[in-house]
Each structure stands twice: as C-alpha cells, then as structure tokens.
Image (tube, rainbow, N blue to C red):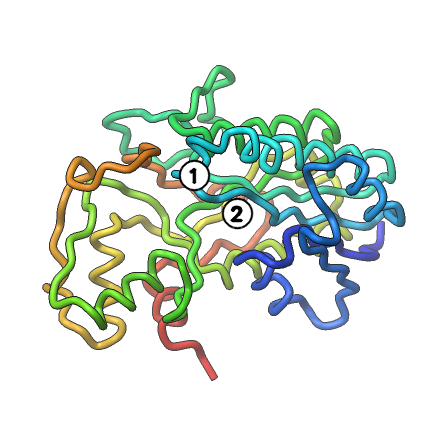
Amino acid sequence: MPLRTVHLVGAGGQLGTALIARAPAGTELIAYSSSLLDVTDAGSVRTALAGLVPGDVVLNAAAYTDVDGAQTDREVAFAVNADGPGHLAAATAAAGARLIHVSTDYVFAPEPGRTAALEPGDLDPDAAPATVYGASKLAGERSALAADPSSTVVRTAWVYTGGPESADFVGTMRRLEASRPEISVVDDQRGCPTYVADLADGLWELTAQTATEPERTAGAVLHAAGGGEATWYRLARAVFAGVGADPDRVRPCTTADFPRPAPRPTFSVLSGRSWAEAGLTPLRDWPAALRDALDPPA
C-alpha cells in the first residue's frame, strides 16, 4: 500500500508545528488548524477529510493539554481529547486510511512506589487516571481504537520545544534563569523529557512505515519518549547548565510545596521497548536532545 497523503490535524500546536517543520522531503502534507477542522464536530471532520483514500494517513496532534484547566473544563477536554479521536477514526475506517493518534503518560493511574518503566500493557482495563486530562486522553485512545481498530496510538511525555519564548518547562526555566537568582523545582516526580523535534521525527518514521508494513502497528499502542528518566529538578539543573548558568541556583522541593489543581504523576517513565520492537528508531536520551534544544545545530 503506497503512502499517498498525510493529513495533519492540530497543525497549529507545539507538536503540529514541529511535524510541519520536519516533514520529509517530498511528503504530500495537508495541515489542518482548528479553524479548518474542528475535531469536536463529526460533520466538520467528515467534510475536511472527505478526500481520504486508502494509503492516506491522518496524524492527530490535536489535543486539549491544559492539565489544570481541564479539571474545571471537563466538557471541552472530553470533546477534544475523547470525542475528537473517535471522529477521526470513523473517517479513516470508512476510507481505508490509517490514523496515528498521539496520547500521553497521564492515562496511567497512580502507582505509589513504582520504579519499573511503564509498558503499554501495564494499563489496567479499569484504570482510573487521577486527572480529567488523563481520563479524557484515555477515553480518546479507546474511542479511536473502537472506531478504527487499525489505528495506532502513540503515548509520549514531558514534551518541550525549549526555545527561550516557548511556554513549556524548558522554555520557562530559561526565562526564570534570566530573571531570578534562585528557583525551587519539584524533585519527587519522575518522567521522560521528550524533545518535540525527536518526537516529530519518530512520528514521521512511523508514518512512513505504514507504506511498507501497514499491519505491523495496526491496532498497536506504542510508547515514544526521550530515553532515560529525570525529575523536574534534574531537568531544570540541566537547563541551567546548558545555558551556562550555575545549576546550584536550582533548589529541590516536593510536590506538596507546590500544590496544583490537577495532581501530577509521581512516576510516569515510559519504556521505549514497544517502539523498538515495532522496528522504529528509539528517541535519543534526553540529555543529548536537550543540548540540541538549547543550542540547535546550524
């Protein structure tokens, strides 16, 4: 089945922007912002994707990602994160196309004391994520696979662009380094920092694989995140060091010191085994990726 056209949904977001910038040469790409395709509206999805044909791929990077905001904005979070993937999957199923849907580590329920990296199969069928955001994303995974069993779900975590103006954690640390003599950062949450450029490259590799081995990841749930693990404190120290600042200006604190409306996972390290076993290139270890984010190669 030859790869024909890639339809990128959520083109205006952090991941969508990176996917456009890093699209392989010769890719026939149609990018949809929310004004062109509203994932919450089944009619909008059907209209926008009316031209889908077998061999096309729909890459869903659209998401409601305000973790704290979702706690009080449940209806919108579920419309985007849960209903949206189902609408897209219904379109790909009808056309014989493929959906690649991006999800998150927040789908896992808290497991106090866990130290083993999370595998896709570790998600309990009765999992109860601790946040509305996580619950909505888990519902989205399930709605996509129910509407089109050939869909592929890709979970990732701690995604950042890292530019000095970016709103993500790394960008925020860069600004705080320039404006404060000392900062406190949580040191009891562990995860996988993921450079958005590496994630985009991985998704393009997965997309291309569907052209030659369409059944290899049909119906699969994969984990794609930066290699290794870190706490937010360790990541912040690495950012300071990476921009030539003294990392000792970063002080450790606990989650209890900074209560948030939505509880954060204490452990959400994603294993990359499923990604590698699918024949895909593992994402780089996070320290190497962070260096490029802070000082992009010419």
- The answer to whether any part of residue 240 appears in the image is yes
Q: Residue at x 40, y 59 (%)?
A: 167
Callout 1 crowding tier (Cα within 10 Å): few <14, some 14–19, many ≥20:
some
Element on which disc 2 rests: helix
User: Residue 209 placed where, x, y %?
Assistant: 70, 52
Amino acid type for the residue under numbered disc 1: Gly
User: Residue 145 placed where, x, y %?
Assistant: 67, 29
Question: Above or below — where is 32 with respect to 149?
Answer: below
Question: Above or below — where is 246 with respect to 189?
Answer: below
Q: Earlier in the sequence, mark 1 or mark 2?
A: 1
Observer-nearest of 212 and 18: 18
Left or right of 100 in this view: 282: left
Observer-nearest of 150 and 92: 92
Q: Quadrant of residue 76?
A: top right
Left or right of 121 in this view: 9: right
Amino acid type for the residue under numbered disc 2: Ala
User: Residue 249 placed where, x, y %?
Assistant: 11, 64
List the single residue furthest toward the top.
126
Mark 2 lies on residue: 276
Mark 1 lies on residue: 69
| Circle 1 or circle 2, nearest the eye | 1
The answer to whether the residue labelled 1 contacts the one labelled 2, judged by CB atoms less than 8 Å apart, is no
Q: Residue at x 51, y 63 (%)?
A: 197
- The answer to whether any part of residue 119 appears in the image is no
User: Distance from label 1 to label 2 (Cα)?
Assistant: 34 Å
Question: Above or below — where is 252 with respect to 128?
Answer: below
User: Residue 278 placed where, x, y %?
Assistant: 59, 44
Question: Above or below — where is 276 with respect to 74?
Answer: below
